[in-house]
Image (cartoon, rainbow, N blue to C red):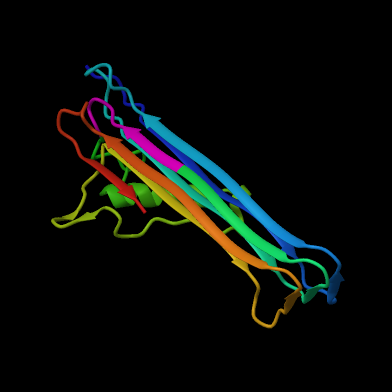
Amino acid sequence: GATSGSGAIALNAGVNTTSATLPDGTDLIIAGNLTLQADHSGSAITTAKADTDSSSVGFAVGLALNLELDRAEAVLYRDLTSTDGGATIHAHTLSDSSASATAGVNGADTTDTTGAGSGSDAQSQIDKQTNFAGSQKALAGKNTPTVDSGSTQTTEGGVSVGAALGVNVAVSTATAEIPENVTLTTSGALILSAANDTDAGAIADGSAVGKGTSTTTTT
């Protein structure tokens, strides 16, 4: 008979920030150039592969969940005057993330209510693992990305229990800012720039399953 299934679940939740700021305080007068530059590079690759080698292996779901927030911020928070120079306030974010899941040969067990693939549908499986990842102490107080409640919806309705689920939620921001009520005076050029380069992908492979469901979500 079939051995018990050992599903594969891989979770990643990260909030990563690179900042270059001049905090609020008394007015500053400088005799040269002002440079606030934040360059951030982030990468997250999450892979979950259940057993696909033998039909004797029991039910096993493959679920890869990646929640990644990458941001760069360069902000001037106080009044500043440069008597002999310019100012550069620049933020750049480079973000690369992916989630890849491979289902076990017999897919997900739709009768299991406690295991790795438990849940009445694919959305329930995703929600369960998202809540677990977001509850970790290392992420306390941080704005962890979330998965939209309708992320597994199709034109024909929701997806049933998924044998392979690849979910990648990538949030990438770059902010270069002089807030309202902050005055910057320079004798030279002002460069205020923000650039964002983001690559994100998700793959769910259910090809090893005799009969199963595969769904991929990228936001």
Please identify the quarter of the rendering in which residue 189 is found: bottom right
Where's the N terminus, which quadrant?
A: top left
State the image coordinates of residue 27 (x, y, percent, origin top left).
83, 77
Where's the C terminus, which quadrant?
A: bottom left
- On screen, 41 above or below 9? below
Q: Residue at (66%, 63%) from the top-left corner?
A: 89
172 sits to left or right of 6: right
Q: Residue at (44%, 44%) from the top-left corner?
A: 66
Q: Nearer the viewer, residue 27 or 148?
A: 27
| Residue 144 seen by the camera | no
Q: Which residues are magenta?
A: 97-107
- On screen, 96 above or below 171? above
Q: Nearer the viewer, residue 140 or 18?
A: 18
Q: How many marks?
A: 0
The question of residue 218 being in magenta is answered with no
Please identify the quarter of the rendering in which residue 141 is found: bottom right
| Residue 39 seen by the camera | yes
State the image coordinates of residue 200 (x, y, percent, origin top left).
40, 45
State the image coordinates of residue 143 (x, y, percent, origin top left).
55, 59
- On screen, 174 above or below 169? below
State the image coordinates of residue 51 (x, y, percent, origin top left).
32, 23
Please identify the quarter of the rendering in which residue 22 is found: bottom right
192 sits to left or right of 10: right
8 sits to left or right of 74: left
